[in-house]
Image (cartoon, helix red, strand yellow):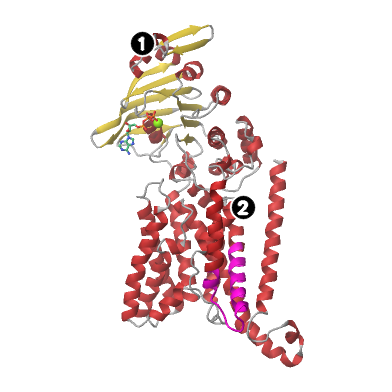
Amino acid sequence: MEQGAETRAVAGGRLWLAAGGLLLLALASLFVGVADVTPSALLDPQTRAATLEALTASRLPRTAALILTGSSLAVAGMIMQMLARNRFVEPSTAGTIEAASFGMLMMLIFFPGAPVILKMTGSAAAALVGTAFFVYLIRRIPAHSPLLVPLAGIMLGAIIGSVTAFIAYRANLLQSLGAWRNGDFSLVISGRYEMLWLTLAFTLAAYLFADRFTIAALGADISRNLGLDYEKALAVGLAIVAAVSAIVVTTVGSIPFLGLVVPNLVSLAVGDNQRRALPWVALTGALLVLSCDMAGRLIVYPYEIPVGTVFGVVGGLVFLFLLLRRPARAS
Amino acid sequence: MIEVEGLTKRYGATAVVDDVSLRLPEGRLTAVIGPNGAGKSTLLSMIARLMKPDTGRIRVAGLDVASTAGEVLARRLSILRQENHITARLTVGDLVAFGRFPHSGGRPGPEDARHVAEALAALDLAPFRDRFLDELSGGQRQRAFVAMTLAQDADCMLFDEPLASLDIRHAISMMELLRDLCRNKGKTVVLVLHDINIAANFADGVVAMKDGRIEAVGDTGEVMTGERLSRLYGLPISVERNGGSCIVNYFRSRD
Ligand SMILES: Nc1ncnc2c1ncn2[C@@H]1O[C@H](COP(=O)(O)OP(=O)(O)OP(=O)(O)O)[C@@H](O)[C@H]1O
Ligand SMILES: [Mg+2]
């Protein structure tokens, strides 16, 4: 008991350390970019007003958007992996992102005048239907073929994606479609990203359900034995995933494979008990996205590489590393 | 107390559990024995509401299994299935602590911590508390699942082949532990056993199943006779009583 409490205290300390690291990185992010925003410009009375303007209109929103997107997408991936009981599942390998895009396209075509929140709701509803269909599909896949699961999801996504692309082409909306798929934060300014704060609410909701998601990950039988309403946990989890995906897709665009890489990384370090892992997943997701975006801003300065491209390289390498080291552990 | 009435489960035309009725009184350790495919796991799964019977009624501790709320039943009845394959990476301590979920609802108190510590100690798992399940041997992992079920502290505990992959010492100490739970805490324990020697020496009662039907049910001494066991398994078997212990010999007529 004593020992358990001690390791918990140490782990808690590390979490605060990582949160401090994120804060520092976020501070640094405020001062990285083309416009001249520096601490000294902020102090100089002559440049203060303009600097402050740039800070609140673009740098702060961008930094907040990166943190919110990174943490919520990573958490969404984690929830999906727990509920699907498969390590290779995330919103972009389960048809969720494509379904959210489809929903948004429908809203743009049929209700172009609707307020943003309504469009997002339409997108989330489509994401929910798509993901629920994915879950229905994978229940019919035998448990011993784990790779079939993401494969089925990717194919489902491809079908929805093609239909969406065809309709978007006809409606002259292909450009929007591209923006939804690949996250780009260079256009984030105050007034155009605030919906992302909603993802924070969903991430917190996920934490409230942490124990239930972990139990659900033990399977339907153990869940029922422990008196957990398995179907309800599944429904809550899918609703969170669908909502987060829809919000992210329609505001800044998705970051493929973030929800795959981060939970696997965290699982290796602290395991899958959601109560412990979820804060780590959220923090790591935010850290990764924020640093990839900053790298994208600096590498070809004064130009920018979109965060999705940078993360594609970093995330791909990390995932390759994970795949290669997994068999090293006895199974 | 577990009461089963007219329980049937069919796959297509074949009844794998065929009109089974049973009464298992509380405070007793009951062994369910029988050849592969007899329907033992199916029977236990239905009692524990993991599977819906086609017909029949089940009452556990006075509660109707089909209609009682899941979280209420989880405090009275627990089951450990024959196979438990999990992909999530949990530590032994985490897994056992989840056994307390029906009582703690996710907010564990000192009582929960005590049950978890006791279950870990009872199964010799204290040194593995912070180990991940995928870093254990098969028998150690099996013990972790049994510890989880013990921590749940239900009145009726069902175990499907809990001794699978345990060494003799751990098998014996687990049986002693379960017998102790029946004697001193009034628990009702039902386990599927393939080791009929263990069943003969530890169980208070035996249910012998074959082809979905109950071939024999009663006190261990009555059911575990050479003639009955030979018929059940289709193999010449003799039962030798030797002081307090009982040896089921299935090697006798091999020469
Ligand atoms: N999904 C299914 N479809 C068809 N038949 C099934 C199905 N599941 C089980 N059975 C059959 O039901 C019968 C009873 O199975 P059960 O698992 O209850 O046996 P058991 O007594 O536990 O056997 P064992 O000792 O091997 O664990 C078996 O003949 C099995 O083939
Ligand atoms: Mg069985």
As drawn, the label of residue A82 is none
- The quarter of the picture where residue B141 lies is top right
Residue assigned mark 2: A269
Helix, strand or loop status at disc 1: helix
Q: Is residue A308 magenta?
A: yes
User: Separation of disc 2 and disc 1 at Cα?
Assistant: 57 Å
- Crowding at mark 2 (Cα within 10 Å: few <14, some 14-19, many 20+): few
Q: Judge depth for marks 2 and 1 and give the one in front.
A: 2
Q: Seen in the image, is B216 located left or right of residue A269?
A: left
Q: What x and y, as percent, mark residue A202?
A: 53, 64
> Quarter of the image containing the C terminus of chain B?
top left
Assess whether residue A39 is covered by the magenta stretch.
no
Question: Visible in this render: residue A234?
Answer: yes
From the image, tell me which residue sits under label 1.
Answer: B227
Q: Nearer the viewer, residue B47 or A44?
A: A44
Q: Write down the region rendered in magenta.
A: A284-311
